[in-house]
Image: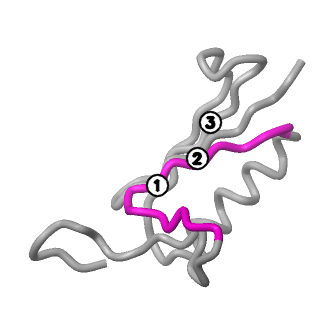
């Protein structure tokens, strides 16, 4: 049995889930209101640590720097939307 963790970050709510053997087989789901980043990520981290997962997938609300040579690799970067800021 493989336990998969998933986290989706959003502007008002972050969602975390646990699936077994395939991403479609969700056995647990939890919502976390978006507050200060250290608080929100701390809550999600604690929840996931108690779930004994084998792998984790993360989806983000903003563009992520995917260039492995970049000094900001893995960071959420500026929005491409005109008139909006991070």
- Give the residue drawn at x 56%, y 67%: 67
The mark found on residue 60 in the picture is: 1
Hey, which quadrant is residue 78 in on the image?
Answer: bottom left
Label 3: few (<14), some or many (≥20) within 10 Å? Answer: many
* N-terminal-most mark, 3 or 1: 3
Q: Identify the residue position indicated by label 2 in the image.
A: 7
Q: Mark 2 Cα within 10 Å, few/some/many (few <14, many 20+)?
A: many
- Location of residue 62 with respect to 86 vertically, above or below: above
Badge 2 marks a residue whose secondary structure is strand
The image quarter containing residue 20 is top right
* Measured Cα–Cα span from mark 1 to mark 2: 8 Å
Camera-nearest label, 1 or 2: 1
Q: Main secondary structure of the magenta part?
A: loop
* Residue 48 position within the rendered picture, expressed as x and y whole percent measured from the top left: 75, 49
What x and y, as percent, mark residue 46? Answer: 76, 58
Tag shown at residue 77: none
In the figure, 46 relative to 74: above or below? above
Which residue is under mark 3? Answer: 17
Instruction: Give the magenta-colored segment's residue range.
Output: 53-68
Q: Quadrant of residue 2?
A: top right
**Disc 1: CA contacts within 10 A as few (<14), some (14-19) or many (>=20):** few
């Amino acid at each position: 049995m493989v336990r998969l963790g998933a986290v989706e970050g959003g502007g008002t709510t972050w969602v975390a889930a646990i699936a077994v053997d395939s991403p479609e087989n969700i056995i647990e789901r939890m919502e976390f209101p978006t507050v200060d980043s250290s608080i929100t990520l701390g809550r999600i981290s604690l929840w996931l640590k108690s779930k004994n997962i084998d792998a984790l997938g993360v989806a983000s609300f903003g563009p992520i720097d995917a260039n492995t040579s970049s000094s900001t690799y893995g960071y959420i970067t500026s929005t491409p939307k005109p008139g909006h800021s991070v």
